[in-house]
Amino acid sequence: MSQQPSSSASILEATGQKHLTQEERFEKVRTLVRPDSESASAALAAEVAALVRSREAEGRDTVLGLATGSTPVPFYRELIRLHREEGLSFRRVVTFNLDEYYGLPRDHPESYFRFMRDQLFDHVDLDPDRIHLPDGTVPMDAVYRHCLDYEQRIAEAGGLDLQILGIGRTGHIGFNEPGSAADSRTRMITLDRVTRQDAAADFMGMANVPRSAITMGVGTILEAKRLVLMAWGANKSAIVREAVEGAVSDQVSASFLQTHENATFLVDGEASADLTRFRFPWLVGPVEWDAPMKKRAVVWLARKLDKPVLKLVDEDYNESGAGELLASTSEAAYEVNIDIFNQVQHTITGWPGGKPGADDSRRPERSQPHPKRVLVLSPEPADAFVGMGGTLARLREQGHEVKVVFQTSGNLRVADIAALNFARVVLEMAESSHSPEWESQTAYARSIVEAIDAKGEFGIDPELVRRLKGLILRGEARDAASVCHLRYHDSEFLDLPFYESGRFRRFRLGEEDVRALVGVLESFRPHSVFATGEASDPSTPQAITYRAFATAWDSLAEADFRADCRVWLYRGRDRPFEAHEIDMAVPMSPDQLEDKVESIRRFMSINEADLNAPTRNREIAATYDALGLAEYEGIEAFRRGPQG
């Protein structure tokens, strides 16, 4: 079965969605999968360009509905490239945006008006009079009339020829939170708590995220002639499956796209991973029963039937749609069960750096050399502790030379109160000392307080404040490292330029960032590298730092240390690995898991999801237990990455 549809399939012409292939039969709306967000965005931009040019040749406007957030950024960048390099003109384009936060001035860096200017409008020849966004600054008593006027302007433009959409974790399109009706129109809406949590990093704290927004309604969106919903990264895979394969429900507003005659989900490989044709391909057609596919199917069957692997029988396979596995191998269930049980069992190790002197033929990591030089890459300071805090401690306790490289300062995640508390302590110390030696410190502390007061609730941190927040986070990171038994000099802070000069959803990887990773690899010459971010949303610091590492790694293909270096992938803020994906499982005792919890708590500006990381470790351990393996308090999971 092909894992990717033909790249020649049209994105905008989705009339074939009622005639899905055998593999797609669980999908209730047409879904196109591309390898990555860049290729998907380029394909969509090319079709939009063709639409704009054809309508311009006919003397007609193209009316585009646009979305914000990180998802459409690569699409907008490709449109800008087409304008600059291939002469695509937007003179006959009219735009309407989905939504806008209520209460933000239009020049605020997180307003969608400002976002669209930064990401598209200021870089193409769009007529400003043809740009339309909801206005989040209208008085409360004028919001209703403003929403009616917005609907009227869409109608006067001839309706939307194409509406671009993203999808939130609650399944919302626009800001149509759970409960939004199919016939809802443009209106003010109260934002869901999950939606505000997801925006917290953009606003440097959830307390700063607006509580309301103005959004097109589901009914308004569904009136567009064409709909394209884009989704990138593993964190979107579960909600994509629910919207594509689940029932139409006002609890997942994206599911209403199933009712549209010309709607397409355009997703990358990671976001498609939970669709039946990719997650359980044996249920939709013949598959090649190689070792990974066998492992996936047997683990799935055991979890589906809530039985240990070794208790599965032939009837379980035949009655659950996996009988072809037995037929393809000419083996009984018992033989297949033992094979897969052993594979899963051999992923478990208490020696993540390899056990010296042991037979390593069935262990995830080789026994030699010992000790190893182990490089742990942490995109933001908390990531390494959230994803592998217990393993960090194990590696250090077992004598390996561990270097944790914090790739970014993480200062955008530090709340104002942390900086204010620091400044106020300095001021109080100065007041209590009555010494002129404190004059410079007093002036510095006051400048911090004044800068934070001046920027207000939704303002941008000046460089002075960002620098202080980064230093505060350094202290917290070193404190967390000490809980994991790491020494002061076991940490290095890169402060990669893309982060220091950017903001969330606006980051751009540069050559300096890659050179910094090359320098780390060349100087440390690791035997093992632990990295994360390969499955993250492409615009996140996690994804960008992983690309920096991957590019640096590829550039060192001829370096002699690479032949003896293994790369392991871990998951921090992203969807955890499933049992069949795990190549190394590091168990933790109750005390070790509590130490991990304590390391995470050392970060003052930590969110609820990160604090719940140990719950995910317990869930992985429970899965291994249910498969018939030993019972552990928690497990940290790893998958093999690109090797030497």
Image (cartoon, rainbow, N blue to C red):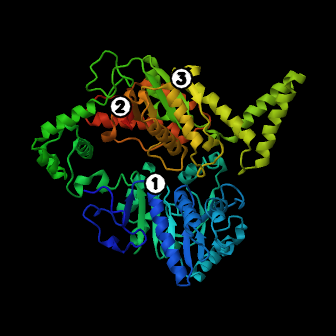
* 51 is higher (above) or lower (below) than 464: below
Horizontal arrangement in the rendering, residue 178 relative to residue 202 (left or right):
left
Q: Residues within 10 Å of mark 2 (few under 14, many from 20)?
A: many
Query: Where, quadrant-wise, is the C terminus in this rendering?
Result: top left
Residue 232's disc is 1
Residue that protrudes farthest toward the front in the picture? 558
Q: Which mark is residue 585?
A: 2
Task: Give the CA distance from mark 3 to mark 1.
Answer: 35 Å
Circle 3 crowding by C-alpha within 10 Å: few under 14, some 14–19, many from 20: many
Q: How many marks?
A: 3
- Give the mark, 1 or 2, whose residue is nearer the N terminus: 1
Relative side of 42 to 583, left or right: right
Q: Give the residue at x 35% y 28%.
A: 632
- Give the residue type that dot 2 points to: Ala
Which amino acid type corresponds to the residue marked 1 in the rendered image? Trp
Q: Is residue 339 above or below residue 210?
A: above
Q: Which residue is mark 3?
A: 483
Residues at marks 2 and 3 touching, judged by CB atoms closer than 8 Å = no
Residue at 34% x, 35% y: name it: 622
Q: Position of residue 393 (x, y in %)?
A: 47, 23
Vertical placement of residue 551 versus 221, above or below: above
Assess disc 1: are there few (<14), some (14-19) or many (≥20) residues with their C-alpha within 10 Å of its C-alpha: many
Disc nearer the start of the sequence (2/3) = 3
In the rendered image, residue 308, in percent from the top left (x then y), is placed at 23, 37
- Residue 39 lies, in percent from the top left, at 44, 58
